[in-house]
Amino acid sequence: MKIRIFITGGTFDKEYNELTGTLFFNDSHLPEMLELGRNLVPVDMRTLMMIDSLDMTDDDRSLIVEHCLKSPEDKIIITHGTDTMAVTAKVLSEKVKGKTIVLTGAMIPYKFGSSDGLFNLGSALAFVQTLPSGVYVAMNGRYFNAENVRKNKETGVFEETGKD
Amino acid sequence: MKIRIFITGGTFDKEYNELTGTLFFNDSHLPEMLELGRNLVPVDMRTLMMIDSLDMTDDDRSLIVEHCLKSPEDKIIITHGTDTMAVTAKVLSEKVKGKTIVLTGAMIPYKFGSSDGLFNLGSALAFVQTLPSGVYVAMNGRYFNAENVRKNKETGVFEETGKD
Amino acid sequence: MKIRIFITGGTFDKEYNELTGTLFFNDSHLPEMLELGRNLVPVDMRTLMMIDSLDMTDDDRSLIVEHCLKSPEDKIIITHGTDTMAVTAKVLSEKVKGKTIVLTGAMIPYKFGSSDGLFNLGSALAFVQTLPSGVYVAMNGRYFNAENVRKNKETGVFEETGKD
Amino acid sequence: MKIRIFITGGTFDKEYNELTGTLFFNDSHLPEMLELGRNLVPVDMRTLMMIDSLDMTDDDRSLIVEHCLKSPEDKIIITHGTDTMAVTAKVLSEKVKGKTIVLTGAMIPYKFGSSDGLFNLGSALAFVQTLPSGVYVAMNGRYFNAENVRKNKETGVFEETGKD
């Protein structure tokens, strides 16, 4: 059982540009993170884009859907910025059936010592192996169905919808 | 759904004693690790012992069994040294039925920058929420049934038994 | 011999705001860094401002000069953003005589695992104890006289002026 | 002005062996540390030995003396375990004249996230550039003359002798 990982950018992969003092995207840190975690689950990684999820367009989401549809693996992890992760999850849940897709990300860039990225990646890898087919968001040790999840903009935390 | 975490020591929690230049156990780093991972799954932690798993006795294992049996939660994570993790897992699988128990640990102490601990903890937390009742070892992104897992002493990696 | 440390902000102290995904200033990390370095040189720290050095005005520099003049200590370290560190150093060298003043900073925020900050702080603390009175920039293990130093905007490295 | 660095081991360079759960010496981390500190001072590194300073013999010290004597550079840093750093410093101060030699080390291995090594290395590099000829120990942001320094075994801290 091989797992497919699609990389789309997000806080996970932001780096600090020391010449300009701003954050930017370079190569993904996923390979390094999986090595640090001593991962032995067979994975195939592919970078689809390297963007802030606030900049993600409908076309970008169509591209992600397309890759999920044509991927031979039926267990897929997508690394994604948290701001619109719930939006992409909903699109995927409408378009891709019969596969287990887990979106995950980080609140703090991996290159910051204090990142939650490694924890989230470990949980996403476990969830994708064990959850039934469907689309999920994995953050904060929890998983949410794509149909009823949103990011609370004020707390930065994912929560189930209809829970006010 | 609250998850119970029992702490028994292991590489996870080893620290460096700067006066003697040796490794030792102090308080557990689990609370700090869960905070770093921004964990929001309700957990209850309890330290049962703080030992190297090579020093774990039958009495120690009986104590762990006893706590798993009387714990009101039926989802339990046990942090454990890797050297005898498979042994403890087998004992638990014989004595505790109807609960999901996941043992996890680390190859490198958490206080070392390059630890696999956060990754393993994230995966253990996900596995315990999703796997059916039984006893499991979660390492390297994978999970193993207690009945057929061993640590390969030469490679340091967990593998299924009967696979030579 | 007590050493005075004035904190003005700069990359040293930038943190990542996980709600907005941008870098910002919170409290200084100097106390934490000195503790990590197990520093035993008596120091007195005071935060004068917490700004990006590109935003530093003439008034801000006057305030720094004023504090250096009235400080009872004649050994002073100033943490400062690198972009205009050489400018502030020149102003200080014209206005403050008879004291040893060392400006230092970082190319990467301390909270990033890969920061040069701790190395620079160690060198600044050594330079301020051993250099004769004057104003200096300490970066990259080197020290420069305020009179002939500039930051090369393309390489991000400090160099002596008149060296093309 | 080139600086010579002699590496002798010590806590600085200890690593964690994940198969045996013990600390050991592999390659030195000095090159990595100087890169992290973005050091631009020209240095030449040479590993003389890779040992715990409690295991250092008179022959080992003679070898260090010999290398200091024949080194063309008159500014020398020696990385050294802290337990007998003061002993080696005294031997060097009797045998090597006319050079500035700074011994430094760490209380915590560099590969541990919380090491004082980078701070100490930064200070040693600054001290060796600015102190007059003589032999010194650089730890905790301070420098000591080889003639009157000892490590307090109880506190783990270096202090001047004759200060009880």
Image (cartoon, coloured by chain):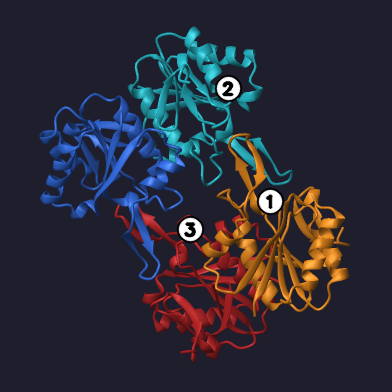
Chain colours: A red, B orange, C blue, D cyan
Seen at 12% across and 45% down, the residue is: C62
Percent across and percent down for residue A128 are 64, 75
Give the crowd class for mark 2: few <14, some 14-19, many >=20 residues within 10 Å. some
* Frontmost residue, D33 versus C5: C5
As measured in the structure, the alpha-carbon distance from the residue carrying label 2 to the one carrying label 1 is 29 Å
Circle on res. A114: 3
Q: Tell which tag, 3 or 2, sits nearer the viewer.
A: 2
As measured in the structure, the alpha-carbon distance from the residue carrying label 3 to the one carrying label 2 is 35 Å
Percent across and percent down for residue A72 are 64, 77
Where is mark 2, residue-wise? D84
Q: Is residue A4 left or right of residue C25?
A: right
Seen at 36% across and 39% down, the residue is: C121
Q: Are marks 3 and 2 on the same chain?
A: no
Q: Which amino acid, mark 2?
A: Thr
Q: Are marks 2 and 1 on the same chain?
A: no
Q: Chain of mark 2?
A: D
Seen at 50% across and 34% down, the residue is: D30
Circle on res. B11: 1
Q: Chain of mark 3?
A: A
Q: Is residue B65 left or right of residue D66?
A: right
